[in-house]
Image: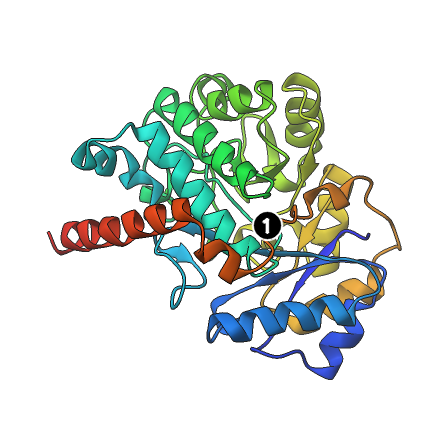
Amino acid sequence: MGPLFIDLLATELSGEEREMLQHPLVAGVILFSRNYHDRAQLIDLVKSIRAASHTRLIIAVDHEGGRVQRFRHQFSAIPAMGHVSAIAQQLAVPAELLAKQLGWLMAAELRACDIDLSFAPVLDVNGISDVIGLRAFSEQPQQIIPLASAFIDGMALAGMKATGKHFPGHGNVKADTHHLEARDLRSFEQIKQHDMQVFSALISQNKLDAVMPAHVIYPDVDEQPAGFSAKWLQQILRQELAFKGLIFSDDLSMKGAAVVGDYVTRAKQALAAGCDLLLACNDRDASIRLLDGLAHTQVKGAESLLGKAYPATWSELAAQSNYKQIAAQAQKIATITSEWDKL
């Protein structure tokens, strides 16, 4: 399995995409809303991806909840994680139990469509960021740790591995790295004692199978964004925090990555810095340049991110009493949060 995740243009595979999926550099596919019409179509698309590739690829999606949920029609609405504590209080249930149920629900529905991975949970601390906000569980690291841990436990019960993002923390920089270069001017000690506490705790609990670094520059440590920095990935994440899992680059097309250079340069720098897997999205020509321009390498252990075989089908999931109960609760939560959004 190679290092590259590619995207698709529409709801069906094109001939070009079938050919790309057979390339030895391709590790997987990341799906977006443009790839989704309804659940039956999604299941057919996943089957066609499986059939087109020589090896079992990792099929992934951003489906963390709130405004970042790529499939909505015929899927349960997963609330923004920043609402979990308030929802739990309103429903008079323990917040950690609710987080675990939501992690299970999100993962179980995706696994029922044979999707391996949702890039979740967000481990950022809610601060001044325009792009994080309620995607974070809390403004306090010590509140995030138990909620994120429970969410991960729920994912694991449904056969899905966890990817913590965005290391070492995106919440205290205002700019959205999808569109802008971002710099966090705090000292390393400030970051270590605040944002990094979440990653450190969950790594020590052996809860994270993968980590995705931020396209943020932390100049007190390195003038390269974290995802392109050997100091952040090898010295701090691997050595100091003793992280043993896989490291994903965030999307190489994001403006926060542009400071590194052109697309192929970004990919090479990310790999050299310590990323194992690369996301290349929303630029087909650039993806092709990567397939042509990168050395043919294999990623040790990448297959560990493949989903476990639970449940076998959507109808099997839908027949489970706990699914019916948790999905009904999610519908109730969606009504509550929609009222909050009107305030």
Q: Is residue 36 above or below residue 168?
A: below
Observer-nearest of 228 and 299: 299
Residue 66 percent across, percent down from the top left: 34, 52
Q: Is residue 196 above or below residue 46?
A: above
Q: Amino acid at mark 1?
A: Leu
Observer-nearest of 101 and 16: 101
Q: Which residue is pictured at 62% across the width and 72% down the height?
A: 45
Q: Is residue 244 above or below residue 312?
A: above
Q: Which residue is pictured at 69% across the width and 48% down the height?
A: 306
Q: Which residue is pictured at 29% across the width and 27% down the height?
A: 94
Task: Give the quadrant of residue 299.
Answer: top right
Q: Specify the farthest residue to the bottom.
A: 15
102 left or right of 157? left
Q: Specify the farthest residue to the right.
A: 296
Q: Specify the farthest residue to the left.
A: 343
Task: Give the quadrant of residue 335.
Answer: bottom left
Residue 106 percent across, percent down from the top left: 45, 49
Residue 9 percent across, percent down from the top left: 59, 76
207 left or right of 261? left
Task: Give the quadrant of residue 164.
Answer: top right
328 left or right of 336? right
Colour treatment of the image: rainbow
Q: Is residue 218 above or below residue 265?
A: above
- Pointer 1 residue: 117
Q: Bin the neighbour count of mark 1 within 10 Å (Cα to Cα): few under 14, some 14-19, many 20 and up.
A: many
Q: Is residue 185 visible?
A: no
Residue 184 percent across, percent down from the top left: 45, 34
